[in-house]
Image (tube, rainbow, N blue to C red):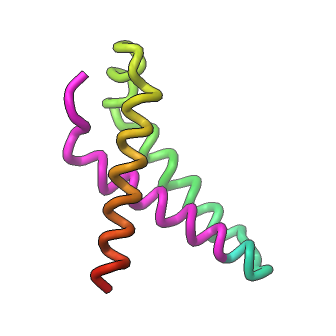
Amino acid sequence: MADLPDDLLPLHVTALRTERAMTAVREQGGDVDVARDAYVEAALVLRAHPFWETARQAGEHHTMWQKSINAARQALDAAAAAA
């Protein structure tokens, strides 16, 4: 399987960012309902991308998911370092 599609990274970054926000709210003892809703919405948009079905059919869903999440983490870490 080839590289990840260009439009996938922003979706995975958003899902990861909202997941981190939800975790932060929970760790601070806050009400996670709004943060969880934002995370679920972002995760559903990410999972609905047609690339994942192609990856499943090729037997590479797990490998591509890991590659995508690693790229999202790198992008978030780079943004944090630049801030």
Quarter that holds the N terminus:
top left
Residue 31, picture quadrant:
bottom right
Whole-percent x and y of residue 5? 22, 39
Magenta residues, start to end: 1-24
User: Residue drawn at (20%, 46%), measured in percent from left and top?
Assistant: 6
Q: Is residue 35 magenta?
A: no
Whether 18 is drawn above or below 9: the answer is: below
Whole-percent x and y of residue 83? 32, 86
User: Residue drawn at (47%, 56%), measured in percent from left and top?
Assistant: 15
Q: Is residue 19 left or right of residue 73?
A: right
Q: Is residue 41 left or right of residue 70?
A: right
Instruction: Specify the farthest residue to the front.
Output: 81
Whether 19 is drawn above or below 66: the answer is: below
User: Residue drawn at (30%, 46%), measured in percent from left and top?
Assistant: 8
Whole-percent x and y of residue 67? 36, 40
Most common SS among magenta residues: helix
Q: Is residue 9 magenta?
A: yes
Instruction: Specify the farthest residue to the right.
Output: 29
Whole-percent x and y of residue 35? 62, 69
User: Residue drawn at (62%, 61%), measured in percent from left and top?
Assistant: 37
Whether 52 is drawn above or below 47: the answer is: above
The number of numbered discs placed on residues in the rendered structure image is 0
Q: Is residue 72 left or right of residue 33?
A: left
Whether 11 is drawn above or below 23: the answer is: above
